[in-house]
Amino acid sequence: MSTDAARVERSAVDDGRALASSGAGASAVAEAGADSGADARKRPVLRLPRLPRLPRLFTAGSRAERATTAAAAVVLIAIVLIAIFADVLAPFDPTLQALDQRRTGPSPEHWLGTDALGRDLLSRLIVGTRATLVGSVTAVAISAVVGVALGLVAGYFGRRVESALMAVTEVLQAFPGFLLAILVVAVTGPSLQNAAIAVGIAGIPAYIRVVRGSVLTVRTHDYVFAAVGMGAGRLRVIFRYVLPNVVAPIVVLTTLSLGTAVLTVAGLSFLGLGAQPPTPEWGVMVREGRDYLADLPYLTIFPGLAIILLVVSLNLLGDSLELTLNKKRSPR
């Protein structure tokens, strides 16, 4: 995640420079001045950089890149739909044991076979999609909410507040994200909920650095000084003029962070620190199948492929989104 954060942070700085030279500052100054006139009917509107619409994600890059992005989007949408309708799609109860049918390979009745306890592997894979996605999305949500808030505070207020927050951030980043998550779970106890919280805490520093770097650029623009001069409060300046200009790098980082969160949550479950049996979760399924890797490799291959598909799809969409944003703000 640190590599993704560094790349997004550099991109955010370039975005801020492009915004400064695009004339948005002049529009914002005019709006700040218009706010002081109570009788003004038509006020200039601050034109903030917008995120690209969904169709534009499939127009950036070469034809092969566009096709790859479209395929990744289809896979991701399919996985999300499977997670939503898992209870309807699963042909069997994912926790139902049938010892007389254990360790059977793929068949017309059990399309992906059964595990060592006779549980239908396809049903566990389908229902496990929900657990994996919920854990990963929860982790990224924690990282984004806390990291964005602290990044805004550090970047806007600066001085001692920034020094203190960045010192804590550097301490957290001194530990690899996966190791930090293991330490948190070791304290809180193994469960999917605690694993999601641990991964969320490990991802906070990346958001702090990206948002802080963007705010440091945005807060020097004329429209921010004009808003402050017109008497706007700090919260109004932050949420009205600063935050909208740092949304783009946050969205890109969130997309890339989801892939990392999926791997980390599944990895914690594989180590016995995340979801616990008999909960169907992809990391748990990989762990349960490792003892039969020589004789029944499908027990590990299918959940492993599901993890790979989800992570690759998220990373491809994140790269496409970043490419689209860079193309949109590049000078013509």
Image: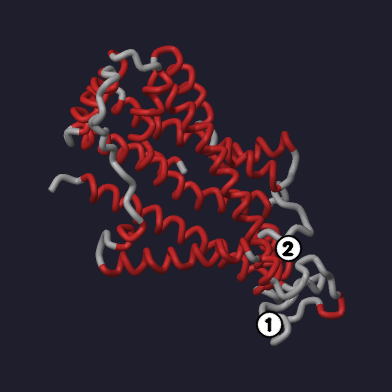
For disc 1, the neighbor class at 10 Å (few under 14, some 14 to 19, many from 20) is: some
Q: In percent of the image, x 23 and y 35: which residue is there? A: 19
| Element under disc 1 | loop
Residue 310, image x, y percentages: 52, 61
In the rendered image, which quarter is residue 104 located in? bottom right
Cα–Cα span, label 1 and label 2:
17 Å
Which residue lies under the disc numbered 1?
Answer: 106
In the image, farthest residue toward the right: 100
Give the answer, above or below, for where 77 lies relative to 12.
below
Residue 264, image x, y percentages: 58, 49
| Element under disc 2 | helix
In the image, farthest residue toward the bottom: 108
Give the answer, above or below, for where 106 lies relative to 134.
below
Q: Amino acid at mark 1?
A: Pro
Q: Amino acid at mark 2?
A: Glu
Q: In percent of the image, x 29 and y 14: which residue is there? A: 230
In the rendered image, which quarter is residue 222 located in? top left
- Give whichever of 326, 309 is nearer the camera: 326
Residue 293 visible, this angle: no
Residue 109 visible, this angle: yes
Q: In percent of the image, x 75 and y 39: which residue is there? A: 189
Q: In percent of the image, x 67 and y 77: which residue is there? A: 112
Which label lies toward us, 1 or 2?
Answer: 1
Which residue lies under the disc numbered 2?
Answer: 288
Residue 16: mark in rendering: none
- Give whichever of 210, 284 is nearer the camera: 210
- Relative placement, left or right, of 325 versus 206 is left
Going from N to C along the chain, the mark reached first, 1 or 2, is 1
For disc 2, the neighbor class at 10 Å (few under 14, some 14 to 19, many from 20) is: some
